[in-house]
Amino acid sequence: MAANAIIGQSGGPTAVINQSLVGVIEGLKAGKDVGTIYGAMYGVRGMVEGKLLELNGLDQAKLERIAQTPSSALGSSRDKPDVEYCKKIMKALAERDIRYFFYIGGNDSSDTTRIVSEMAASQGYDLRAFHVPKTIDNDLMENDHTPGFGSAAKFVACAFMGDNLDNRSLPGIKINVVMGRHAGFLTAASALARQFPDDGPHLVYVPEKAFDIDTFIGDVDAVYKRLGRCIIAVSEGVHDASGAPIITKLAKNLDKDDHGNVQLAGTGALGDHLAAALKAKLGAKLRVRADTLGYMQRSFPGVVSEVDAKEARESARKAVELALKGEKNGSIAIKRVSDSPYKVAYERIELSAVAAKTRTMPPEMLKGDNDVTPACIAYLKPIVGNLPVTEQLPLVK
Amino acid sequence: MAANAIIGQSGGPTAVINQSLVGVIEGLKAGKDVGTIYGAMYGVRGMVEGKLLELNGLDQAKLERIAQTPSSALGSSRDKPDVEYCKKIMKALAERDIRYFFYIGGNDSSDTTRIVSEMAASQGYDLRAFHVPKTIDNDLMENDHTPGFGSAAKFVACAFMGDNLDNRSLPGIKINVVMGRHAGFLTAASALARQFPDDGPHLVYVPEKAFDIDTFIGDVDAVYKRLGRCIIAVSEGVHDASGAPIITKLAKNLDKDDHGNVQLAGTGALGDHLAAALKAKLGAKLRVRADTLGYMQRSFPGVVSEVDAKEARESARKAVELALKGEKNGSIAIKRVSDSPYKVAYERIELSAVAAKTRTMPPEMLKGDNDVTPACIAYLKPIVGNLPVTEQLPLVK
């Protein structure tokens, strides 16, 4: 008798997370011994509540449209299952004779997959449990980079390209707050916007370095004195030397999630705070503006890295391939085989290698406390792909 | 002897303002009696300070790259010239025997053009002075719509498409603040994001209607109770019944420009304020997030309406055509000739018809106090052009 399968999506969406969903569905449809392919609505929550969709009947045209649609088509969840929660998941799997489990998400999702896999093993329930990587933060261990990051990085690079041109035409100081709680990769991608020598971002602040407000003000002042303008990229997760996020210094009405993390996205507070600090120190007459790039970074349709879309699909197919071959469990990691020509390989890694861990930017990608290195740019370029070409005229202030 | 020409760009940039710049340059290069084509750096400021670029030598490939680059390539200005300022402009024109004057901008720029034209006439100085329309706000009188608006509207529509998908996967309340001080057209364009019956934005607030915070909270509560989520589009310029902008009720560190207008853009204050008000009334446990779409709306590269790019170029060419034919002055208005097939005409209108006036949304485009009508959607569609196609799966909460 054919074994059934289940797929879930978890955590913050990305522009290409549905490429991975479609990659799993395609792989399973091509498998010989696969029966019903269930989609769990809203991640693990749909599993325990029995809210499932049957996905076998989706035709290729609809699958392609889903693949090109940003954000989790099955719905997502911020639930972080503990052992009790995972017991309910196991019960739901057994009730429907589900033998293939695929969970698309970040490091919390790989941890859920690990718990479910271990529970199945201890109960003698034959299950193949795979984690398919996804995160715009690019913070999964063992991975050169993660599906979802390239497209978010492309959005960030384009946003800074446009904002740099805007700021060049109406000079002033401009702060843009970029997503990233612990890892600065996405903020670093702002540096891809530089096409001409005077292009911003002129300063880049990531969570890998302690953030000091007085140093920040001094940095901005120096750039402004030199260029008559300054574009700044700041990670939402910048923190002081004690590790306290800068945003908590002005926290009011900020939510905390199930993990105890304070809300960083969906508010303009950090940017507004930094803008006010600059005006207070450098002069109230200065034109200082702050934007927070917000949820657009992970969901904007049409701004997608082709490499990212392809890798999101292929890493999912790899997970299915391994599961159908009989591998019990694992996560898929993207390894860079060569830079030129750009080439990657998809490798099975242990769930425990990625579960509940966070990768941050390596030191060789960071230049001083406020910039990235050429090595960082070289790393980012093939993942993000082609950017719009811009032109400039030589202006004299 | 050939007469010389000058071009300036003014006010907030758009994604296609350089299409208009290139349209003027191309038209002038093709003209028989045109000598040096000067570009004024940073608008009128470059004129009075003698900071000029000679543009005749730009080849077609470079012109095309400039045309496709967002934001004012010549630099821009927020200066609002008075009579004294315009005297200096006149002096600069006479010194260089400049007989063609083109100013690309909004209603303030047409007023500058009017003053300069009248001053030239009163001095017996032979000058052709034309205003070329530009504004993402779509608020110029006599125009069906304005160059720059379609591309900004496309960005807003895409942003809401993505955010709607994001919010569908992780349900909650989401506020997006859109540019627009007096006119709600750009905020209304968020409604183009609706592709499926449950798609947001579910509520749309424009400056044409007085904004009441309690009514707003009640509206959001009703949608949230019905759908379990709510996406809200709010113009930055929403104001109470007395006309006071809602943002000034929490104003701290907000700049005022030369026109006495309080800063609305470049801050997340309005969104954060509305989010806090919702949580205070509807429950602190609610997931409420706010993003301010920010300067990306007017400068994001690659997200351009093809119709908008074409019209920005053609309206500039029309201005040059009229000037070379001997018309003394005027502004170019886009008139809609037919909806299906979509067709426009470019007409000369008096500078005084557009100078320092503001067009707002007509009542037939607004439905109640928190939505737009099908007539509004029909009006917007051809201007914005094709949007990404998305797909959805039927989810049960």
Image: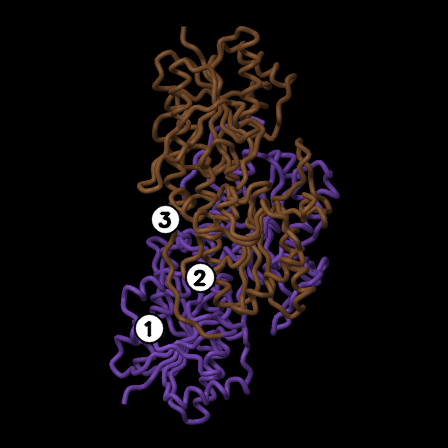
Chain colours: A purple, B brown
Q: Amino acid at mark 1?
A: Ile
Residue sticking out furthest to the bottom: A124
Residue B317 x/y as whole percent? 38, 25
Tell me the kind of residue under disc 2.
Answer: Gly
CA distance for labels 1 and 3: 29 Å
Residues at marks 1 and 2 on the same chain: yes
How many angstroms separate mark 1 from mark 2 (CA)?
18 Å
In the rendering, which numbered label is found on residue B27? none
Residue receiving disc 1: A25
Q: Is residue A119 left or right of residue A310?
A: right
The answer to whether one can see residue A282 in this image is yes
Q: Are marks 1 and 3 on the same chain?
A: no
According to the image, label 3 marks what residue? B386
Q: Residue flagged by tag 3: what amino acid is it?
A: Asn
As rendered, which of A136 and A71 lies closer to the eye?
A: A71
Residue lying at 67% horizontally and 68% vertically, measured from the top left: B284
Q: Quadrant of the N terminus of chain A?
A: bottom left
Q: Chain of mark 3?
A: B
